[in-house]
Amino acid sequence: MNSNWREAMPSATAYLVSKVLYRLHHRPEDLAAFNADRMAYLERYPLSEELRIALRDDDIAALYLSGTNPYLLRAHCIGVGIPEKVSLAALRSAGDAPNG
């Protein structure tokens, strides 16, 4: 297991979260649906409640630790207007999080 992630890579969970982020930022209708009602949009995917909440709340550290593709996570931060300073601080805090 990579020490940066909670899941063995690649995992189905990491793939699914990355797929959600890809669709959000490559399909305008998906981003519009997400922005209208994040939890309703996320119900389309077989995600854990923990990951739905992380996506809803833009919990960058939790998404990174789930094994999300870091390039898609960065694109998500840009796409939803999370300032770089905030996203980098979240990633730094993820490095301090216990694995497991």
Image: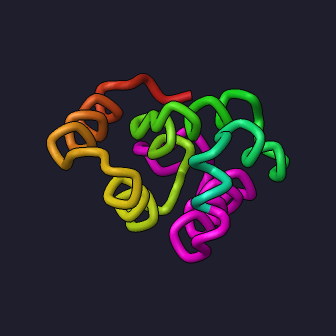
| Spot occupied by residue 76 in the image (x, y as percentages of width and height) | 43, 57
Give the residues drawn in magenta, as a range.
1-30
Compared with 22, 87 (above or below) is: above
- Percent x, y for residue 36? 63, 45
Q: Is residue 12 magenta?
A: yes
Of 92 and 77, nearer the camera is: 77
Q: Is residue 64 left or right of residue 66?
A: left
**From this viewpoint, which residue is outermost toward the left?**
85
Q: Quadrant of the C terminus?
A: top right
Residue drawn where x is 19% and y is 49% of the image:
84
Q: How many numbered marks, from 0 up?
A: 0
Residue under the image location 35 percent in, 33 percent down? 94
Q: Name the colour scheme.
A: rainbow
Q: Is residue 15 above or below residue 51?
A: below
In the figure, residue 70 lies in which quadrant? bottom left
Q: Is residue 28 above or below residue 3?
A: below
Question: Which x, y percent locates residue 18?
Answer: 59, 61
Q: Residue at x 40, y 36 (%)?
A: 61
Give the main secondary structure of the magenta stretch. Answer: helix
At a point 52% along the width and 55% down the height, the residue shown is 68
Q: Is residue 27 visible?
A: yes
Is residue 10 visible in this depiction of the protein? no
Image location of residue 50, percent across then percent down: 67, 28
